[in-house]
């Protein structure tokens, strides 16, 4: 192995471990939302919580959702806001990294994430907590930056395996983070400001992550390979928030006609996949609680199973495994059948996004890679902002079985689109 190969391998591993720290900090809050909402319902002195609760209750009553799922819908609303803010920020962060380098933008986003955790720790009101989530959502462009860095540091032959490492980092984060968060709830039960303990855990992880990146990550985009200035694509500010421009990748320049068609098609496949997937993923909480009497601990074990299976199956199965997954989950009558469906669900989760990210990273060249991947990530965030709301509407309108069967059928659309996409051999 040459020195260059060694440096590439080291750089990818640095980003992998950085992502693990970041995702552990990010996911620790996920099982805490119901308890956080209960806390602010009792102790918030402002009007934001009560007004948002009234809106959620109106939605819940219109759909016929049981009262005990208000916190789930509330969490979905906050999650959709977080994803929508990622939709707004990811293309800009990616484009700026093409000009000023990956490391400065990576550190800026990480400092923003750290600030959001610090606000969470000090959130004595619901308004401050929402402000923390807003800052966190706007700062979460570090994920698209990490994919750009991995693409910078890998060759065409090794890019797929390198991108799979990002999937493994997600699997680790989403397996361990929620379990740690739930443990904090149990450990700090009875204390008034119990949430400061998981918040400080996230703060410590982000401080370690920032120090780690400062000292161990070397810039992956040298000066001679950067974009020239902000006068080009970044000057077209409207394109950064216009969904039609993002779907058309109007910010990306100098592509051949066939490359442009492929890039737009892969972006649409990614959006449709995450639109259907994220909605059905969100309603799993309803399904398992109502039909299988899962409490929060059993749901935690379910998500741990998903995360572990994803880590083990990286690169083994593809997009089409999601179709039987949601058929089986939606029609399952026993826990064994549910977990059989979750196996296919995990397999699809493990490979689809890394594969699509690998494909799209081959477009735009080194000078536009951050912009391409930022736009791509933005489309996924938009899908995650819309999917849970639409799926909740369908779930409570027509029932879980038809909702999941319909989702499985719709997932055939991106699969068929992928079959018709002409992917160059080098990708």
Image (tube, rainbow, N blue to C red):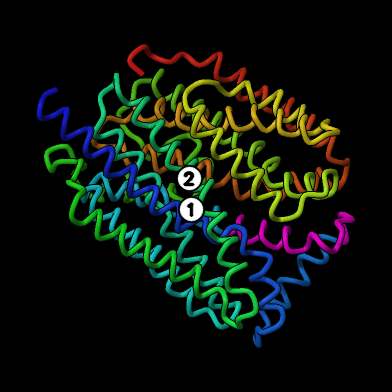
Other residues around mark 2 within 10 Å, as few (<14) / some (14–19) / many (≥20): many
- The quarter of the picture where the C terminus appears is top left
Left or right, 416 with respect to 423, comes to: right
Residue 86's label in the rendered image is: 1
Under circle 2, the secondary element is helix
Which residue reaches farthest bottom? 45
- 1 or 2: tag closer to the N-terminus: 1
The residue labelled by disc 2 is: 378
Residue at x 30% of width, y 29% of height: 254
Which residue reaches farthest front? 187
Q: Measured from the top left, where is residue 145 in percent x and y?
A: 34, 45
- Give 99 or 181, whichever is nearer the viewer: 181
- Give 195 or 409, whichever is nearer the viewer: 195
Is the C-beta separation of discs 1 and 2 under 8 Å? Answer: yes
Under circle 1, the secondary element is helix
The part of the chain drawn in magenta is: 61-81
Residue at x 72% of width, y 76% of height: 51
Q: Measured from the top left, where is residue 418 in percent x and y?
A: 55, 19
Against 6, residue 182 (above or below) is below
């Amino acid at each position: 192995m040459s020195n260059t190969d060694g440096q590439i391998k080291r750089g990818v591993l640095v980003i992998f471990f950085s992502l693990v720290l970041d995702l552990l900090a990010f996911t620790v809050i996920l099982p805490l939302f119901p308890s956080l909402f209960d806390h602010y319902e009792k102790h918030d002195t402002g009007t934001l919580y009560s007004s948002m609760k009234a809106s959620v209750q109106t939605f819940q009553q219109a759909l016929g959702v049981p009262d005990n799922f208000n916190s789930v819908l509330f969490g979905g609303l906050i999650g959709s806001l977080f994803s929508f803010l990622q939709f707004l920020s990811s293309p800009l962060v990616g484009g700026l990294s093409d000009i000023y380098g990956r490391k400065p933008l990576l550190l800026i986003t990480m400092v923003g994430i750290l600030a959001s955790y610090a606000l969470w720790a000090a959130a004595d009101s619901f308004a401050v907590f929402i402000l923390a989530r807003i800052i966190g959502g706007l700062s979460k462009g570090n994920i698209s930056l990490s994919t750009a860095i991995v693409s910078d540091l890998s060759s065409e032959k090794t890019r797929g395996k390198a991108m799979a490492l990002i999937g493994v980092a997600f699997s680790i984060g989403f397996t361990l983070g929620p379990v740690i968060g739930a443990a904090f709830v149990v450990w700090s039960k009875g204390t008034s400001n119990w949430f400061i303990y998981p918040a400080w855990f996230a703060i410590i992880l982000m401080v370690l992550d920032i120090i780690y990146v400062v000292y161990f990550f070397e810039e992956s985009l040298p000066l001679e390979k950067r974009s020239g200035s902000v006068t080009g694509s970044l000057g077209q500010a409207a394109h950064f928030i216009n969904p039609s421009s993002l779907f058309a990748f109007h910010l990306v320049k100098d592509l051949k006609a066939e490359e442009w068609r492929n890039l737009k098609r892969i972006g649409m496949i990614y959006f449709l996949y995450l639109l259907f997937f994220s909605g059905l993923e969100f309603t799993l909480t309803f399904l398992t609680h109502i039909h299988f009497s899962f409490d929060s601990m059993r749901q935690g074990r379910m998500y741990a199973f998903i995360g572990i299976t994803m880590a083990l199956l990286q690169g083994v199965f593809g997009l089409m495994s999601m179709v039987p997954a949601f058929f089986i989950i939606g029609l399952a009558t026993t826990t064994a059948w549910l977990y059989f469906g979750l196996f296919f669900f995990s397999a699809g989760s493990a490979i689809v996004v890394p594969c699509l990210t690998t494909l799209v990273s081959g477009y735009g060249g080194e000078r536009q890679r951050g912009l391409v991947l930022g736009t791509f990530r933005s489309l996924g965030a938009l899908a995650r902002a819309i999917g849970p709301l639409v799926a909740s509407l369908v779930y409570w309108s027509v029932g879980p079985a038809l909702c999941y069967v319909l989702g499985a059928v719709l997932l055939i659309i991106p699969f068929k689109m992928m079959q018709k996409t002409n992917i160059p051999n080098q990708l």
